Amino acid sequence: MSERANEIMGDRANGWDDGDVGEPPADYSNHTKSQFLDDVERRLKLFMLRCVKVCRTLPDSYDAKHFGQQLIRSSSSAAANFRAVSRGRSQKEYFAKLSVTIEELDESLFWLETLVFTDLMPEHRLSDLIDEGYQLLKILSKSRKTVSD
């Protein structure tokens, strides 16, 4: 397991460290709800697309195919479920769809980290994608907390 893989598991298992991110997180304080939803939906779609591209570069082995299929499934599910968030008919439905999105995004991060841990992909090729995933996870978790308050 790489040094970066150990760092990811250690730091992120105990909570998010803003110092890990190469660029500052987006500031949504001046956005309308619609602008926020549109931007996060766009970012989740790009995250999914980048995950698909990663999977296309994986070796042709059983484990790589399995992990790649899981990554595509979870990242596309995160993007699709977030799309449903903006069409929620009630605050409870919004919260529920947002929770599913967070769960699928977290699973995507698990599969990306698994690719690093199993040495199927070098960490330097995935670090920006993993950082983007954790930024999105932090944004969506904060949004869910705001809705529940």
Image: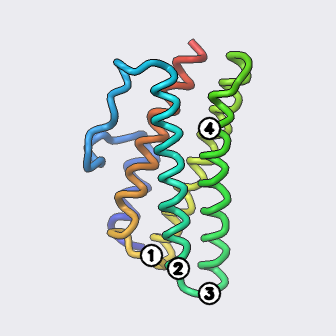
Q: Where is residue 107 in the image (x, y as percent from the top left)?
A: 60, 53
Cα–Cα gap, marks 2 and 1? 7 Å
Q: Residue at x 49, y 40 (%)?
A: 137
Most extreme residue toward the top is 149
Answer whether labels 2 and 1 touch (C-beta < 8 Å).
yes
Cα–Cα gap, marks 3 and 1? 13 Å
Q: Mark 2 points at which residue?
A: 58
Answer whether labels 4 and 1 touch (C-beta < 8 Å).
no
- As shown in the figure, which amino acid type bears the numbered disc 1? Met
Q: Which residue is drawn at 40% across and 65% down?
A: 126
- As shown in the figure, which amino acid type bears the numbered disc 2? Leu
Q: Mark 3 points at which residue?
A: 61
Comparing labels 2 and 3, the label whose residue is closer to the camera? 2
Residue 127, quarter of picture: bottom left
Q: Where is residue 77 in the image (x, y as percent from the top left)?
A: 67, 50
Q: Which of marks 4 and 1 is nearer the N terminus?
A: 4
Q: Mark 4 points at which residue?
A: 82
Cα–Cα gap, marks 4 and 1? 28 Å
Left or right side of 18 for 56:
right
Answer whether labels 2 and 4 touch (C-beta < 8 Å).
no
